[in-house]
Image (tube, rainbow, N blue to C red):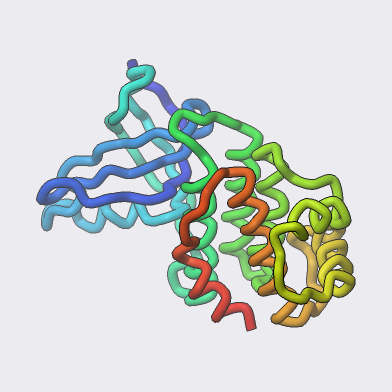
Amino acid sequence: MLKKTEGIVFSFLRYQESSIISKIFTRELGLKSYIINGVRSSKSKGKIALYQPLTILDMVVYEKGNANLNRISETKLQHAFQTIPFDFYKSGIAMFMAEVLSKSIYESYQNEDLFDFLVQAIMFLDSEEVHLSHFPLVFLWETSKYLGFSPGNAEEFFEEIQENITRQIDWGAEMQSLNIIIEQSFECSVKIPAKIRRDLLDHMLALYSKHLDFGGEWKSVKVLRQLMH
């Protein structure tokens, strides 16, 4: 059965000589794995660009219920990025977002409210108005609401994570900064010291690891931390 939907690309893996398997979070069908044949061939004319992380697509797909691998009938770019591919900082944030989402959302998980929020966040990241220094923190905080494990406020957040923190932390400064981020969300333009932002990043990821039962390495964080100056 053919189904029209929108999708956000999370990642892709090379498959055989010229194909890929791409994980795409669709609005109506949830997270699905799609096999796309021939997209890496010399005749594909750059179609692989459609499957870069966070690309937003309009799709017509073959829906086969709980099939492990699905196929796409038609796909086209919904929004051509204006800044993300050309800005090293934004590209690093995009890779980070894609990794967080890949580790947070399981196959067939469907949440239209989360999808709509992610589209808005991606579009804002691609805009000229975005405040990059705070964006990863706001993204983590807001996304946790849709995933169902967001603390009610900054105080509850630190109460939940402090048992896992062994080094000395300036909790007061972090709490004050987090309250600003929570209140102002993506519009936050208040200058927050880089060290506090990096510590908040580590602590928010600790919250994600706890609730997602993920004990592995966050591969994109090393680059992101270097960008948070």
Q: Position of residue 136 (x, y in %)?
A: 64, 63
Image side of residue 29 versus residue 2, left or right: right
**Residue 104 placed where, x, y %?**
54, 44
Horizontal side, residue 60 vs residue 149: left or right: left
Residue 130 in sight here? yes
Q: Is residue 65 above or below residue 158?
A: above
The foreground one among 196 and 38 is: 196
Placement of the C terminus among the 4 image quadrants? bottom right
Quadrant for the N terminus in the image: top left
Residue 83 in view, yes or no? no
Residue 147 spot, x, y in % from top left: 65, 39
Q: Nearer the viewer, residue 205 or 1?
A: 205
The residue sitting at 51% across, 30% down in the picture is 109
Residue shown at 51%/62% (left/top)?
A: 96
Q: Residue at x 38, y 51 (%)?
A: 11
The x, y position of residue 9, in whole percent, is 42, 47
- Residue drawn at (48%, 68%) of the image: 91
- Indicate left or right for 214 with 150 as reference: left
Give 163 or 115, whichever is nearer the viewer.
163
- Identify the image quadrant of residue 61: top left
Figure disc tally = 0
Vertical placement of 177 versus 205: above or below?
below
